[in-house]
Image: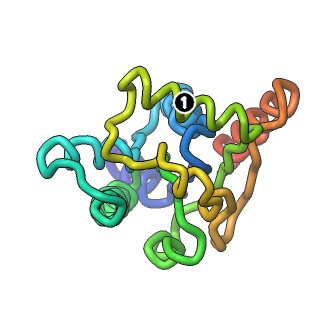
Amino acid sequence: MRATSEAHHTAAKTVRLLLITGLPGSGKSTLARLLARRYAVLLLSKDAIKEPLLEVIGTGDAAHSRMLSDASFAVLFAVARQALTARLDVILDANFRPGEHEAALAEFPSASIAQVLCQIDEPVRLARVARRRQDGARHPGHGDATPAVQAQRASDAFLELPGERLTLGGGESADARALEAIDRYWHGA
């Protein structure tokens, strides 16, 4: 009898899909790792997919980097689809592209979706990106340290998806309030 009630509880569970987005260097991966530990949940990161592709396939020009990013997003969405189908909560960490990635994420109508947009002052963000390039913490094949990519602001916005939208940035008190809001979403979904 117990197995039946557990199976029923699992089937009735609303799965949560938390998207952490923003520009390179805005702190999204740091936040995503913190939240994945906090909620003991699966974290899927576009960069964790793209890094091995860069190692195996190699680096190239901006078009090559974009192609590997597109491939990384395709893998990210496919793995997320499998996890959500298995009724697992998921956090996705990527610089999602408004107007482009909504269709792939709209395939999860039974998931409770929330988005967190990470934003910081532009000089701080650019300094972080420059530090990454100098300390080798990020594969140079990402290409996000080039002036053209740094100037691009397209991923500094929410996707057009239903669900909560939270902005993280603006100082410690604003960040603390945003974390409380993320906790409310997570525990209330």
The residue furthest front is: 147
The answer to which quarter of the image holds residue 55 is top left
Q: Residue at x 78, y 31 (%)?
A: 175
- Total numbered circles: 1
Q: Position of residue 116 (x, y in %)?
A: 66, 49
Which of the colour schemes (rainbow, by chain, secondary structure, one colour) is used?
Answer: rainbow
Above or below, comparing residue 139 to residue 6 in the picture: above
Q: Nearer the viewer, residue 23 or 109?
A: 23
**On the image, numbered disc 1 is attached to which residue?**
30
Is 181 in front, or is 142?
142
Q: Secondary structure at mark 1?
A: helix
Q: Is residue 122 visible?
A: yes
Q: Residues within 10 Å of mark 1 (few under 14, many from 20)?
A: few
Front residue of 3 and 26: 26
Q: Residue furthest right?
A: 173
- Residue 86 visible, this angle: no
Q: Quadrant of residue 69?
A: bottom left
Horizontal and vertical percent position of residue 81 = 35, 63
Residue 79 at x, y = what percent?
30, 57
The answer to which of 175 and 113 lies nearer the viewer is 175
Which residue occupies the extreme left position in the image?
Answer: 56
The image quadrant that residue 62 belongs to is: bottom left
Residue sitting at 68 percent across and 50 percent down? Answer: 117
Left or right of 76 in this view: 165: right
Where does the image place residue 76, in percent across and percent down from the top left?
34, 57
47 sits to left or right of 103: left
Residue at (48, 51) in percent of width and height: 94
For the residue marked with disc 1, what is the amino acid? Thr
Residue lying at 65% horizontally and 59% vertically, measured from the top left: 153
Q: Does 25 sit left or right of 40 as displayed?
A: right
